[in-house]
Image: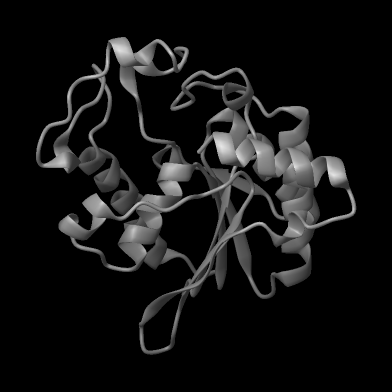
Amino acid sequence: MVTNLILIRHGQGKHQTDNFVGGWTDTVLTDLGELQAQYVAHRLGKIIEGTIAIISSDIKRAAQTAEFISRELLVDIEYDELLREINQGVADGLNRDKILEIKAPKTQPILDWRPYENAETWREFDRRIQKFMAKLDKREENSLVLVAHSQTIVSIIHNWMGLTDDQKSITDIRIDNCSLTILSRLDDGTNFIRTINDISHFNTEDTLLSREHVILTSRFR
């Protein structure tokens, strides 16, 4: 039975430095993103015990991050498109300064707001994540390393903690590139958050990594 979900957001992607919408766009990691992935992979190598599996979004920036983790843990990667970021429809791949021109006004309930043509609403996206999580009951590993995207991780946290729709609509969580979030389950079935958005593996004498990480995560979410 799975008792730990270890959630990793992909490393910094080109869409972040080039200021365009990521979503389902198959953008790749930057040099800094690859370095971030190396650091979090090394961290996981130190803390993970027991039987594990690595499941990654099939979008390239997540898959590249998962490859670093796979090499560190010596575990093959499974890919699941249910772990993709929220689909932003026609806004995917567009410059962030341009999308305001095509963004729909907010509607209520906010979970059903469709910000762009062909985009997922949060409710549609959340149901996709719930479909993924329903498959976890069939897993036999102690821990799963899930490599995904910021909003994907937020939705997993929401559902792991059993938030209501009203609670989900007002609860947002910052998830930085290659941060570590661990969700755990007690023997009695109680779910809890062990750690969230942990980036202590970037506290290093490598001042370039530390400085650039702080600058970039303060600008891009």
Q: Position of residue 142 (x, y in %)?
A: 56, 73
Whether residue 84 sits left or right of residue 48 in the image: it is: left
Q: Is residue 48 visible?
A: yes
Residue depicted at x 71% and y 36%: 33
Relative to 55, say whether 2 is above or below: below
- Count how many numbered circles sit on residues in the image: 0
Relative to 126, say whether 116 is above or below: above
Q: Position of residue 86 (x, y in %)?
A: 37, 34
Residue depicted at x 64% and y 48%: 178
Q: Quadrant of residue 12?
A: top right
Whether residue 33 sits left or right of residue 207 in the image: it is: left
Colour treatment of the image: one colour
Whether residue 77 sits left or right of residue 196 in the image: it is: right
Q: Position of residue 55 (x, y in %)?
A: 55, 50
Q: Quadrant of residue 104?
A: top left
Viewer-side residue, 20 vs 134: 20
Relative to 68, say whether 184 is above or below: below
Viewer-side residue, 48 vs 192: 192
Q: Quadrant of residue 215?
A: top right
Whether residue 163 sits left or right of residue 161 in the image: it is: left
Residue depicted at x 33% and y 59%: 158
Instruction: Tell which residue pokes out farthest to the bottom in this image.
Output: 188
Relative to 186, say whether 161 is above or below: above
Q: Is residue 74 visible?
A: no
Q: Position of residue 31 (x, y in %)?
A: 78, 29
Viewer-side residue, 61 vs 212: 212
Instruction: Tell which residue pokes out farthest to the left in this image.
Output: 108
